Amino acid sequence: IIATELGVWATSQLNGAQTEWAPPAPGIGMPLTRTTMLQARQSDKVVLAATYGRGMWTSDLFSDPLPVITGSRVHYTQSPLFLTGQRSLRAESFAWDFGDGTTASGETVSKEYAQIGEYALKMTINGSLSETVSVKILPDHSLPYTSEGEAYSGGFEAYPEQFGVHTIKGSSWERGNSSMPGKSGVNSGNNAFVIGLDEEYYQPNTETYLYLPNFDFSVQGIYELSFWAKYKLQGGFDGFQLQYSTDRGQTWKQLGTDKDNDWYNYTNESEPAAAFPLGSSYFSGNKNSFDKFSLNVSGLAGNENVAVRFVFRSEGTGNHNGLAIDDVKITKYDGELLTQLLSFGGEFSSASQIRLTWETQPEYKCQYFDVEQSLNGKTFESVGTVNSKGYLSTDLKSYTFSTPGDRLLYFFRLRVVNEDPQADYEEIFYSPTIAIRKENFYSGKEVLRVFPNPFLDYLEVTFTDVMDDDVYYELYDMSGRLVLKGKQLATGPLLRLEMNEQPTGVYVLSLRIGEEGAERIFKLLAE
């Protein structure tokens, strides 16, 4: 073969001036373009052709036949596993044996395994040359994925059928307890998964995958994924990340970003030579002892299929120890799926400033808190909004809010807004009302005012504090005749009293908080 201005030409016999050269067939193989260099790789006799502006092309023209299987070595049941022999050399025919009694032919095939387990996958080319690899099919798993759950394997002590490793090149994920610095030991039990268990340094250009089961997130809930890890990696260039698949291993996406708390510590923003592509987030650098990393994965709720894998990659330079991970868990909150307000209070933080505080646990699709203020305990208006910190979280969340306050008495409440328009979910509720008052002016619980005046058929009473007390009332006309008497439980800052449409005239209302409380007298007009 010879490189020319119009591609690579070939001949079956060199015969001086009589040599007959054949050009590339149009539309087949490499283009008719300037080719500037040919190089042969001695190991397999593959020839590389460098073109002008059309990339590099290879040919196995001089190679010995060699079967090469390309495709994932770990997969899931009820999902097509795509396999190809395209990288095989001088292959003219392909025969596949999937190890479960089924076969196929063709350069590229797909196989859907019905049962979990390890299968001996065999591909034969040209009728006689074959390659056999092991394919591991992983199971589905319910949640939670914890030691309290069913058939838990995240501590890597039991159920080895639930995890699998596929190494493209370099060092591999290996199960055990390493003695090598930077990745030694375990977080619990006897086993972790380690990059290069007995290697002091992981190999350059490593690419290896650790697969976990396919999890069922179909039930709405609050979920958290966590694991423990220690590592010593080339900062920024080498690292590991988690990926997830919602189609049983067909496609994979990065799980989480460096913006998530307790998660990735690096994003490749400018280094094309790094092991992960530009824009990827991952763990990198050093962690000298086992530390816990956790991510809220409630956004995956509603998916029946969520497979998870750990991906480790390195570029080609440096000597670094590696990585160990242990105790992978996925927790599921078992309580009521509703934001819970644990506390709400406040005080005058200065002569003219009020500071409110509250706590939540959990938060379920919590968007924000609308802080509402009232001067009389009846009419409220918004004085500010605070965004939620958790949205979907089982962690304790604490909040503060400050607002001006130059009056003696205020009432506050929270309007808690929980919503997810995509899921057609909305739950809005109010906190209990609280009273913020200057204690040097108000003490105890007192009647503040009565309205409306004039009244028709009812009266409303406000107080100097939030009530949970019986209020005794007596209504007299101007002749001193008792026309109405009763007792009513007041809850909150406001009480409504029914007056039964009294005749027009002037009345006197007596109010006492509790049977032994001090009496307050109000003169009223009935319309």
Image (cartoon, grey):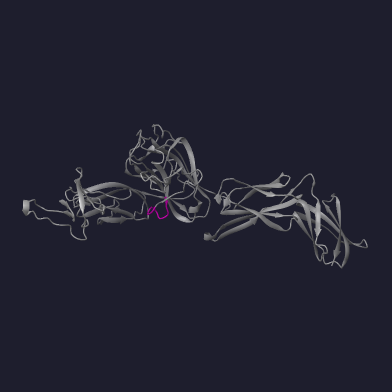
Q: Quick check: 131 left or right of 78?
A: left
The boundaries of the magenta stretch are: 244-251
Residue 203 in picture, x, y percent from top left: 33, 38
Establish if 178 lies above or below 347: above
Question: Magenta stretch mostly in which secondary structure?
Answer: loop
Q: Quadrant of residue 94?
A: bottom left
Q: 204 and 108: which one is in front?
A: 204
Query: Quadrant of residue 472 in the image?
Result: bottom right
Judge from the rendering whether residue 478 lies leftward or rightward of residue 230; answer left or right: right
Q: Residue at x 15, y 51 (%)?
A: 2
Q: Please say whether residue 432 is visible from this viewpoint.
A: no
Left or right of 307 on screen, residue 391: right
Count the numbered circles shown.
0
Taking the image as shown, residue 351 lies to the left or right of residue 359, namely right
Q: Position of residue 5 (x, y in %)?
A: 18, 54
Report if residue 282 lies within the magenta region.
Answer: no
Judge whether residue 128 can be spotted in this image. Answer: yes
Q: Is residue 358 above or below residue 521?
A: above
Query: Where residue 139 sits in the image (x, y, percent)?
Result: 40, 50
Q: Quadrant of the C terminus?
A: bottom right
Nearest the viewer among 76 and 355 is 355
